[in-house]
Image (tube, helix red, strand yellow):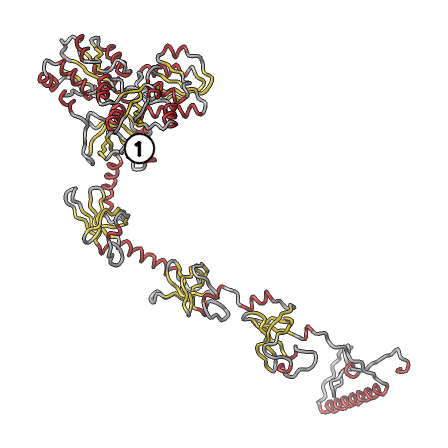
């Protein structure tokens, strides 16, 4: 009875290197042996693919860099010499190269756990210019002197996991600061864990692999520790030393061991191939779930690469999670890889710490990238489908949802949502009939269910409409628009086009009219004299009628009136220039600015008497005048105010003039007294009342007959009292 380790045989890194080598066309050579297995190396030689140990041996052809990787200097040399190469470095090894190179660039000391002579370690050391400290066991770590600088610790991918943990504890006390990178490959850990579990349960343990394979030797050491009858089988010849009297035989193999060798060992260890098949099919009382192993039919080893169906769902178990993605096992002999972009619905949510080894979840098989050697799977598509299915209940309740149109068919559009097919009839694509549904293919469309028909999960169908959403939104926008169209409210609008009678203005994407008479306080011939196309202005709502769908806007109502501007521009006392436009007898109207004119009254034309303004002005005549008054929207101008007043005339008054004037006044006074006496005689006598005498203050003297004052009598006389002749 055989217990064959599930992890036996090529890891994906080795398989990738071999595949790239066999797929290469033309002449190729490998930098070093492609893997540490003579059987594989010899088969490649039969195909004309030989290894070279240094570039000095290179003659022609393309160089294949093996899975162990090489140092930076090898890449530089090939690039400088124009040597074409195919990089088959294991992704896990390549990751170590990046860690080491970045640390070295910022001055950190690199420490590597591994075998100094191993090709992988030599390659890693080449990324820090061969300055790394290489430690192969705990004794070397203990002998290390204290390092007073920042360090990093990495490991050969096939190094013993147990040794690495022990060395890690020692190194932490040997460095000032150390950053630990556990870079042992997950397949190495699984192999080492599995060989221990199998070795504890079998009578004989066979470890198949090359004598120069580091991971194979470590497997043999672990097997020997738990099963004394453990053998290292590097070729069929080594089976001669195996005592075949065991009931149960355990089989494992290193990462570079081909399936053909494993099959051959199993067949020889059996009496016949038939007997071997019967033995392998028998039940063994071992809890496979706890052990993590499986009993493998030897004939199954003959099958080549697993070819799962694209889109098929499978339950997977997490093997290892890194920043690049998750390695999972789906129950086959090879593992699969879920890229970080295919783990969560949003790549930003991916965190390797959330996926522990052994964790289970569902995933589907997807097409792998051209440069990926592993089977590709996706968890994201599972999550998306679950999310889409959960949306269904909301959808049948009438909630809006978004679909991506897959194709146009006769009568409408088709889309998928989870397990449901969404059909949008041609009449429901938009408001109005859509003549070219194919224009929507590949685009997102917001829809709402108008009918649902449930069959089985593969035929579930939802009939949806975008038109119902568009109609509701249109009605909502119209309501919002008319609720804002309140007279005397100020709104912003964009001038879209002109007409002879006004300007059409877009307010919240609705056309409104600003009539030409409401654009300016002055007369304009064209709206473009006031407004510019595609420019935003403020308007006042003059009238809004939802029934007719018309909105009238005013622009001039928000602007200052011409005479308000004129009052600021031409204050009282300022001098203006203008043109005589109209002349009447009472004055002349002068234009001083666009839409602004002022009146020059006839009395303000000259200090000399002017009977008619037509005597002083002609239409079109340019004049200067002074602003002397603003009253409402009327401006009063004066030309006279800009002229010098005439000098007063001198009049000589003689003594005869004075005597004559006094006589006239005396006669007038006597006449007034006589009239007063006559009036008094006619009135009835009143009772005498004692009244206190009131002394009147004489402000001026007025002749009762003429109403003239003393000042009037002497008006125009030249009285010079300093002249003794006039006394």
**596 on left or right of 725:** left
Q: Is residue 686 above or below residue 361?
A: below
Quadrant hosting residue 82? top left
Q: Image point 31% across, 58% down: which residue?
A: 475
The residue beneath circle 1 is: 340
In depth, the one of 59 and 311 nearer the eye is 59
Tell me the quadrant of the picture where the C terminus can be found.
Answer: bottom right
Tell me the quadrant of the picture where the N terminus can be found.
Answer: top left
Q: Position of residue 405 (x, y in %)?
A: 25, 47
Q: Residue furthest front?
A: 59
Secondary structure, mark 1, is helix
Q: Is residue 590 above or below residue 533?
A: below
**564 on left or right of 16:** right
Quadrant hosting residue 696? bottom right
Q: Image point 30% across, 35% down: which residue?
A: 341
**250 on left or right of 547:** left
Q: Residues within 10 Å of mark 1 (few under 14, many from 20)?
A: many
Q: Is residue 611 above or below residue 36?
A: below
Note whether residue 493 is visible. Answer: no
Note whether residue 705 is visible. Answer: yes
Q: Is residue 343 above or below residue 603?
A: above
Q: Image point 43% across, 23% down: which residue?
A: 104
Quadrant hosting residue 126? top left
For the image, the number of numbered tags is 1
Q: Position of residue 456 (x, y in %)?
A: 14, 43
**447 on left or right of 454:** right
In depth, the one of 98 and 399 nearer the eye is 98
In depth, the one of 218 and 179 nearer the eye is 218
């Amino acid at each position: 009875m055989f217990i064959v380790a599930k992890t036996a045989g090529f890891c994906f890194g080795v398989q990738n290197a071999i595949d790239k080598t066999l797929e290469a066309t033309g002449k190729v050579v490998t930098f070093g042996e492609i893997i540490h297995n003579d059987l594989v190396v010899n088969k490649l030689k039969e195909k004309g693919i030989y290894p070279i140990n240094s570039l000095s041996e290179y003659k022609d052809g393309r160089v294949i860099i093996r899975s162990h990787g090489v140092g930076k200097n090898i890449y530089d040399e090939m690039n400088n010499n124009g040597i074409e190469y195919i990089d088959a470095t294991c992704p896990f090894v390549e990751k170590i190269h990046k860690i080491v190179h970045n640390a070295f660039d910022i001055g950190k000391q690199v420490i590597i756990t591994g075998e100094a002579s191993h090709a992988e370690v030599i390659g890693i050391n080449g990324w820090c210019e061969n300055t790394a400290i290489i430690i192969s066991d705990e004794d070397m770590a203990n002998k290390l002197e204290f390092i007073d600088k920042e360090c990093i610790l990495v490991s050969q991918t096939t190094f013993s996991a147990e040794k690495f943990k022990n060395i890690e504890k020692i190194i932490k006390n040997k460095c000032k600061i150390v950053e630990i990178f556990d870079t042992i490959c997950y397949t190495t850990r699984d192999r080492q864990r599995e060989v221990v579990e199998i070795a504890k349960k079998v009578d004989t343990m066979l470890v198949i692999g090359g004598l120069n394979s580091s991971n194979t030797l470590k497997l043999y050491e672990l097997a020997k520790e738990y099963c004394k009858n453990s053998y290292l089988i590097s070729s069929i010849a080594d089976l001669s030393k195996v005592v075949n009297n065991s009931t149960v035989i355990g089989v494992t193999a290193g990462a570079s061991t081909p399936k053909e060798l494993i099959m051959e060992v199993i067949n020889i260890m059996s009496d016949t191939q038939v007997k071997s098949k019967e033995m392998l099919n028998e039940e063994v009382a071992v809890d496979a779930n706890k052990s993590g192993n499986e009993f493998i039919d030897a004939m199954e080893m003959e099958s080549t690469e697993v070819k799962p169906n694209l889109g098929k769902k499978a339950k997977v178990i997490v093997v290892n999670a890194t920043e690049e993605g998750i390695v999972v096992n789906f129950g086959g002999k090879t593992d699969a890889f879920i890229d970080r972009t295919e783990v969560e619905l949003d790549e930003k949510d991916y965190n390797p710490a959330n996926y522990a080894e052994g964790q289970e979840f569902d995933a589907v098989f997807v097409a792998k990238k051209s440069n990926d050697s592993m089977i590709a799977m996706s968890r994201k598509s599972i999550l998306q489908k679950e999310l889409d299915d959960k949306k269904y209940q909301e959808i049948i309740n009438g909630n809006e949802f978004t679909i991506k149109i897959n194709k146009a068919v006769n009568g409408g559009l088709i889309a998928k949502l989870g397990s449901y097919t969404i059909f949008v009839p041609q009449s429901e694509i938009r408001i109005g009939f859509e003549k070219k549904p194919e224009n929507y293919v590949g685009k997102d469309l917001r829809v709402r269910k108008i009918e649902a028909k449930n069959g089985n999960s593969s035929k579930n169908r939802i009939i949806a409409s975008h038109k119902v959403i568009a109609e509701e939104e249109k009605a909502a926008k119209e309501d919002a628009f008319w609720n804002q169209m309140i007279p005397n409210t100020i709104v912003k609008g964009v001038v879209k086009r002109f007409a002879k009678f006004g300007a059409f203005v877009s307010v919240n994407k609705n056309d409104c009219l600003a009539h030409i008479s409401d654009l300016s306080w002055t007369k304009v011939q064209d709206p473009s004299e006031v407004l510019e196309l595609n420019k935003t202005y403020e308007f006042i709502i003059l009238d809004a009628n939802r029934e007719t769908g018309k909105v009238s806007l005013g622009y001039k109502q928000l602007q200052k009136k011409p005479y308000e501007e004129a009052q600021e521009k031409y204050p009282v006392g300022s001098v203006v220039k203008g043109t005589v436009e109209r002349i009447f007898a009472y004055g002349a109207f002068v234009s001083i600015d666009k839409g602004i004119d002022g009146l020059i009254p006839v009395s303000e034309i000259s200090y000399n008497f002017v009977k008619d303004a037509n005597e002083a002005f002609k239409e079109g005549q340019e004049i200067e005048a002074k602003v002397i008054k603003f009253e409402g929207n009327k401006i009063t101008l004066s030309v006279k105010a800009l002229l010098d007043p005439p000098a007063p005339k001198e009049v000589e008054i003689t003594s005869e003039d004075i005597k004559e004037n006094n006589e006239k006044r005396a006669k007038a006074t006597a006449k007034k007294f006589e009239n007063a006496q006559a009036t008094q005689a006619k009135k009835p006598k009143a009772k005498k009342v004692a009244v206190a005498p009131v002394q009147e203050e004489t402000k001026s003297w007025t002749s009762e007959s003429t109403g003239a004052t003393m000042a009037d009598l002497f008006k125009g006389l030249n009285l010079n009292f300093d002249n003794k002749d006039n006394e």
